[in-house]
């Protein structure tokens, strides 16, 4: 796999309203900010990483990767982070992963990329736990103008954007636990216990 074809965009631009408006990527999980788990897992999988964050940029910059904010403001969802990633990336593909899934699979990029190639698709998203996992998506960088048109039309739902393109789906059902995602204090406590085991 040509990993130098792909830039990883770590999505850390949300408001975390269900966690009291904290900056989710910086929330401590077993003494480490949550984003560090994602960075550590994605680093061996790509050559270029960009962090998408709308707050605390100076803290995120300490990881040594470029930090970009949403160009379309107002916290309009993960698509805004993807659009910023597409705008800044110089590779033919980007892959996204959220800052709040600390167990992210070590074969994420490989499986998304090989599935996309097999199906000659424009986008490949992950499927697990009985549903699409659209914040884990590989896509062609040339889709930037399509995504900007979509957002500028006031659209926000990623599934509706997927419908406009040739979408492949990579099945990670046998790795369901790697898509665990932290949306509440309870889920944070539960994963902390799991990591200790
Ligand atoms: N760039 C960007 N990313 C976002 C935005 N909203 C959510 N995300 C990211 O999308 C991923 C999944 O979002 P959620 O789990 O809903 O996180 P959230 O929106 O911060 O949390 P809630 O406010 O509780 O929904 C996370 O990686 C978020 O950082 C946004 O407006 N801009
Ligand atoms: Mg949200």
Image: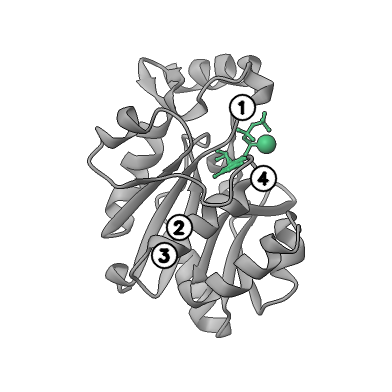
Question: Which residue does the numbered mark 4 point to in the structure image?
Answer: 76
Above or below residue 68? Residue 120 is below
The disc placed on residue 110 is 3
Q: Quadrant of residue 61?
A: top left
Q: Quadrant of ligand 1?
A: top right
Q: CA distance from mark 2 to mark 3?
A: 19 Å
Q: Nearer the viewer, residue 126 or 6?
A: 6
Mark 3 vs mark 1: give the one in front.
Answer: 1
Q: For disc 4, does the CB lie below 8 Å from ligand 1?
A: yes
Above or below residue 71? Residue 183 is above
**In the image, is 38 to the left or to the right of 162?**
left
Question: Which residue does the numbered mark 1 point to in the structure image?
Answer: 16
User: Which quarter of the image is occupied by the N terminus?
Assistant: bottom left
Mark 1 vs mark 4: give the one in front.
Answer: 4
Q: Is residue 197 visible?
A: no
Q: Earlier in the sequence, mark 2 or mark 1?
A: 1
Q: Earlier in the sequence, mark 4 or mark 3?
A: 4
**Percent position of residue 147, x then y:** 62, 67
Q: Nearer the viewer, residue 47 or 58?
A: 58
Q: Is residue 158 visible?
A: yes
Q: CA distance from mark 4 to mark 3?
A: 29 Å
Question: Which residue does the numbered mark 2 point to in the structure image?
Answer: 85
Count of numbered circles on the image? 4
Mark 3 closeness class: few <14, some 14–19, many ≥20 residues within 10 Å:
some
Q: Residue at x 67, y 24 (%)?
A: 17
Q: Earlier in the sequence, mark 2 or mark 4?
A: 4
Q: Earlier in the sequence, mark 1 or mark 4?
A: 1
């Amino acid at each position: 796999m040509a990993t130098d074809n792909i830039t990883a965009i770590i999505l850390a631009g949300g408001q975390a309203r269900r966690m009291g408006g904290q900056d989710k990527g910086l929330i401590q999980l077993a003494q480490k900010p949550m984003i560090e788990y994602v960075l550590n897992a994605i680093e061996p999988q790509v050559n270029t990483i960009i962090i998408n964050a709308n707050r605390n940029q100076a803290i995120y910059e300490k990881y040594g990767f470029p930090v970009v904010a949403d160009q379309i403001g107002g916290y309009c969802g993960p698509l805004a982070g993807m659009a910023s990633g597409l705008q800044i990336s110089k590779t033919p593909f980007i892959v996204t992963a959220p800052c709040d899934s600390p167990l992210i699979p070590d074969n994420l990029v490989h499986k998304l990329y090989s599935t996309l190639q097999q199906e000659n698709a424009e986008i490949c998203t992950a499927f697990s736990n009985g549903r699409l996992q659209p914040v884990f998506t590989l896509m062609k960088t040339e889709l930037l103008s399509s995504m900007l048109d979509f957002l500028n039309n006031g659209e926000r739902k990623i599934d509706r954007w997927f419908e406009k393109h040739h979408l492949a789906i990579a099945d990670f059902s046998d790795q369901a636990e790697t898509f665990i995602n932290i949306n509440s204090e309870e889920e944070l406590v539960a994963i902390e216990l799991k990591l200790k085991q």
